[in-house]
Image (tube, rainbow, N blue to C red):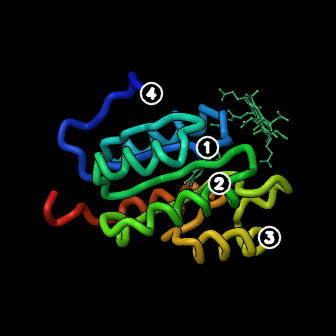
């Protein structure tokens, strides 16, 4: 996806993606703008990227942060699968990887306490942090992004 101004010297490089089954797009535009506002350069893989594409782009870009977004409610399954693939790679062992949005089809959205089971499952699969779809989740995400250090070798 193109057309959103990136900062000239990004503080962080972020790979942003939907999940393989998820065709929702405005969530990704929203997150790209939010991340750009925080001084991040964003490689937006768009909706429905295959797991293979996410893995290949993360290896190519070597981002400071990977952000997955789920809106169709399958993030709990699709996200867990792709984070396990990423965490198997030595280059992706310690990179912060987060997921947020609507993580299940019941609308519990990963927000504790209602979404604690989803959040715990996704953290156990390898995510550094899990966010729901509420305004408070977006605020928490913004604080999280501000706390991520750029890689020392960048
Ligand atoms: C537009 C839309 C579509 C369009 C998408 C077009 C496009 N190119 O984007 C189309 C028609 C394709 C579509 C299809 C489907 N949709 Co739809 N869709 C919507 C709708 C109306 C708006 C979504 C939107 O664009 N919102 C605007 C963006 C900016 O907000 P957002 O996506 O909600 O993202 C916010 C948060 O979720 C959060 N967030 C998201 N990701 C992340 C990540 C992080 C890290 C953080 C912190 C926060 C965060 O922040 C964002 C801003 O607040 C919603 C209902 C609604 N009013 O929300 C349903 C909705 C999302 N769709 C839904 C469903 C079920 C489907 C389908 C399965 C329907 C079907 N049976 O075919 C398919 C799924 C297709 C697929 N393969 O994914 C459900 C999801 C239910 C759930 N997950 O619990 C919703 C909620 C409708 C409903 N009430 O049932 N959809």
Residue 134 percent across, percent down from the top left: 68, 54
Q: Nearer the viewer, mark 1 or mark 3?
A: 1
Q: Secondary structure at mark 4?
A: loop
Q: Which mark is residue 9?
A: none
Mark 4–mark 1 CB contact (< 8 Å): no
Q: Which residue is mark 1?
A: 20
Q: Secondary structure at mark 1?
A: loop
Alpha-carbon distance for marks 3 and 4? 33 Å
Q: Is residue 12 left or right of residue 21?
A: left
Q: Nearer the viewer, residue 98 or 39?
A: 98
- The residue under the point 26% across, 37% down is 7
- Residue 147 seen by the camera: no
Numbered-mark total: 4
Alpha-carbon distance for marks 4 and 1? 16 Å
Residue 46 percent across, percent down from the top left: 51, 34
First in sequence, mark 2 or 1: give its number.
1
The quadrant holding residue 106 is bottom right
Q: Which mark is residue 114?
A: 3
Q: Which residue is mark 2?
A: 78
Disc 4: residue Cβ within 8 A of ligand 1's nearest atom:
no
Q: Nearer the viewer, residue 52 or 106?
A: 52
Q: Quadrant of the C terminus?
A: bottom left
């Amino acid at each position: 996806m193109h057309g959103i101004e990136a900062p000239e010297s990004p503080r962080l490089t972020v790979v942003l993606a939907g999940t393989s089954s998820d065709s929702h797009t405005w969530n990704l535009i929203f997150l790209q703008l939010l991340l750009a506002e925080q001084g991040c350069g964003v490689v937006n893989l768009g909706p429905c990227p295959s797991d293979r594409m996410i893995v290949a782009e993360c290896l190519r870009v070597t981002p400071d942060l990977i952000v997955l977004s789920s809106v169709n409610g399958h993030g709990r399954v699709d996200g867990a699968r792709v984070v396990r693939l990423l965490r198997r790679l030595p280059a992706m062992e310690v990179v912060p990887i987060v997921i947020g949005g609507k993580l299940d089809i019941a609308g519990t959205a990963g927000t504790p306490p209602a979404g604690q089971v989803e959040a715990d499952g996704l953290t156990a699969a390898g995510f550094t942090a899990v966010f729901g779809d509420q305004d408070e989740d977006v605020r928490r995400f913004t604080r999280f992004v501000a706390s991520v250090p750029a890689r020392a070798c960048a």
